[in-house]
Image (spheres, rainbow, N blue to C red):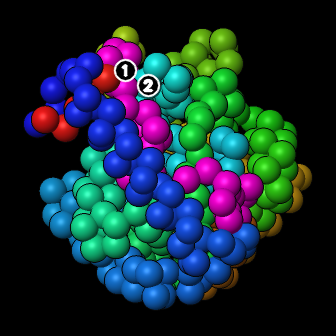
Amino acid sequence: MLQKSMSSSSSSFCTLLIGLLFVVLLGGSLSHGQLRTTFYDTTCPKVSKIVRGIIKEALKKDARIGASLIRLHFHDCFVNGCDGSLLLNNSATIESEKEALPNNNSARGFGVVDDIKTALETACPATVSCADILAIAAEESVSLAGGPSWKVSLGRRDSTTANRTAAELLPGPTEDLPSLKKKFSNVGLDTTDLVALSGAHTFGRAQCRTFNNRLYNFSGSGNPDPTLNTTYLSTLKGICPQNGDTTVVTNLDLTTPDVFDNKYFSNLKVLKGLLQSDQKLFSTTGDETVAIVNKFTANQTAFFASFVVSMIKMGNISPLTGTAGEIRLNCGKVNDDCTGSDGLLYSST
């Protein structure tokens, strides 16, 4: 059990962490400067099996967890690249991205990530980065939900900093299409990537606060969003009454909420996209996104193929490789940070 202390044992604990980090930096598998699917073949060959096993167990208690884990990967990669920065807790030196508006009381699955990290530290100490855990967990979550599988490029290292300011600017559920396109373009993703990655909303849940603007006073009109199916509107008003609890959740995909398929796009075509940012993909007349939605609605195989390409592209956003960053031993804090959010030192005694 950890106890607050200013004793010499705290110093020893820090020394141990730094020593382990030094061993990792000398490891041959971390000397390469680019991602590859075979990165852990010799240093941690069962990494994907371990990750998959823990997610399977988590799904028995929480059907949402797969969608939550892929969202963590998305929110991590869009802020300073895929570097595990989202996982860092507040400390004397870190202002956590978890408390940015798009993540606060919304991003979830951190406990499962910690469980995965604990298991991997037992199997392959100081080897698998937290950033890579998020990438593997995203792929396994999609596969377990009936979606496509793919070989995940690996070799990311973990950042030692977070960026709360950038996290405040993550793509949001009420944004218009030009704004969404710009935010995707800023990280090297195109319009097809935008539509394909939005298809991850084929499973998971969303809180009333992310879409209730569409139900009662859309754009200050005093009326609902005209691009919302009227029958679906009535259903949503029952789930999210005006001035009700905005943290209540409902399915993003009303047809197959826990299955990874192309029904998300079918919903958009009948004006049953839950989020404004979803429905805009189909209801923005004349935009190229409409044709892509039509294509993915008609052909699930085409959606799966594009989704895989887009996930790999997203996973390649500015990763730390080689000797940059570190391999965190605890995903919630950097290795040389032996302080808690209260600024006090902790020992292992």
Which of the two residues, 74 or 266, is positioned nearer the viewer here?
A: 74
User: For the residue carrying disc 1, how many other residues have a C-alpha within 10 Å: few (<14), some (14-19), or many (20+)?
Assistant: few
The dot on residue 341 is 1
Residue at the (74%, 55%) spot, across then down? 318
* Residue 15 shows in this picture: yes
Horizontal side, residue 174 vs residue 119: left or right: right
Image x and y of residue 229, in percent = 54, 43
User: Majority secondary structure of the magenta segment?
Assistant: loop
Pointers 2 and 1 in contact (CB under 8 A)?
Answer: yes
Residue 12, above or below 90 = below
Judged from the image, the secondary structure of the residue bearing numbered disc 1 is loop
Horizontal side, residue 159 vs residue 314: left or right: left
Residue at the (38%, 16%) spot, across then down? 343
Q: Amino acid at mark 2?
A: Asn
Residue 336 is one of the magenta-drawn residues? yes
Judged from the image, the secondary structure of the residue bearing numbered disc 2 is loop
Q: Which residues are magenta?
A: 316-344
Q: Amino acid at mark 1?
A: Ser
List the residue tagged with mark 2. Answer: 90
Residue 304 is one of the magenta-drawn residues? no
